């Protein structure tokens, strides 16, 4: 319990914590990491972990230094100093956006939602993503049990990759199982995007995904004028 000082790393300017792996970017743009080797982007297929901060030499193969690293439950995303985006790690549901995805409709139990034991879809080295963009500003994916990521460019354009179940993409599409309320009935890969898909939820006015939760609770809420909750969907789905 309590705080524990991580020794061996100095002048840290960015920290990213994954489910079982962690990164630190230092002031000299060096990257240090510890945790599961196979998901650290170092070209290793070794499932054993580093138990202390280790200098990640594989990152030195990148032309420019990394400025941001964001992780989710499987994959890691990074941005370099020239706005180029990179990813690596587990990609059974398309999380990395590199085109890698599990080629079966249902996972091999006991992998479950996280596909924890699936290693044939791990991208072991940093791979360039959204290659036509050099203005990637941020990634949003750092949360427990998240198998997707959003990328934001400096002009406000959003991109999505990974598991799209539960209407998470915000593109106006809802898979049949979410409509029925049975979120765990299937593991259909048609929900997922294995490459980065442009998303513009702000053009979907009138769709079931745009209105804020207060509009679902009460149409009288300021700004909710004209919104009608679809009768065939429960409020939690609309929200």
Image (tube, grey):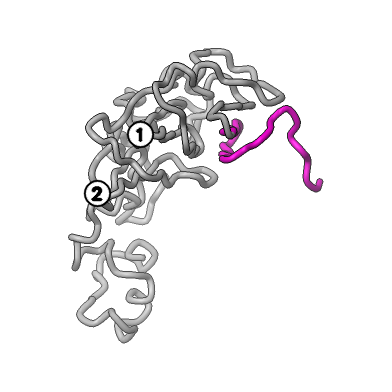
Disc assigned to residue 199: 2
- Residue at left 40%, top 34%? 81
Q: Residue 50 location, x and y as percent?
A: 66, 21
- Residue at left 40%, top 29%? 87
Q: Residue furthest bottom?
A: 220
Determine if the magenta segment contains residue 148: no
Q: Residue furthest right?
A: 1
Q: Left of 128 or right of it: where is 59?
A: right
Q: Residue 203 location, x and y as percent?
A: 18, 60
The quarter holding residue 137 reads: top left
Q: Residue furthest front?
A: 28
Indicate which label's residue lies in the foreground, 2 or 1: 1
Callout 2: helix, strand or loop?
A: strand
Vertically, is 140 above or below 218?
Answer: above
Q: Please state the total of marks drawn on the protein image.
A: 2
Vertically, is 125 above or below 69?
Answer: above
Magenta residues (range): 1-26
Q: Which residue is mark 1?
A: 82
Q: Nearer the viewer, residue 101 or 236?
A: 101
Callout 1: helix, strand or loop?
A: loop
């Amino acid at each position: 319990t309590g705080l524990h000082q991580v020794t061996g790393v100095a002048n840290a300017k960015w920290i990213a914590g994954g489910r079982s792996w962690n990164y630190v970017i230092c002031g000299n743009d060096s990257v240090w990491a510890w945790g599961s080797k196979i998901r650290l982007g170092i070209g290793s297929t070794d499932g054993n972990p580093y138990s202390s901060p280790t200098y990640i030499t594989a990152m030195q193969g990148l032309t420019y230094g990394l400025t941001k690293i964001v992780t989710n439950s499987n994959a890691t995303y990074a941005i370099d100093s020239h706005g180029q985006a990179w990813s690596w790690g587990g990609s059974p549901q398309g999380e990395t956006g590199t085109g890698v995805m599990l080629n079966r409709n249902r996972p091999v139990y006991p992998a479950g939602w996280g596909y924890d034991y699936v290693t044939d879809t791990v991208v072991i080295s940093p791979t360039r993503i959204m290659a036509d963009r050099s203005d990637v500003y941020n990634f949003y994916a750092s949360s427990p049990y998240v198998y997707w990521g959003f990328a934001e460019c400096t002009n406000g354009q959003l991109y999505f990759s990974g598991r799209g179940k539960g209407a998470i993409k915000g593109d106006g599409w809802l898979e049949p199982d979410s409509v029925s309320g049975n979120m765990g009935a299937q593991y259909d890969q048609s929900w997922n995007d294995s490459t980065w898909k442009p998303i513009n939820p702000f053009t979907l006015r009138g769709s079931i995904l745009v209105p804020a939760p207060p509009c679902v609770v009460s149409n009288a809420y300021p700004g909710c004028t004209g919104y009608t909750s679809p009768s065939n969907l429960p409020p939690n789905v609309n929200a």
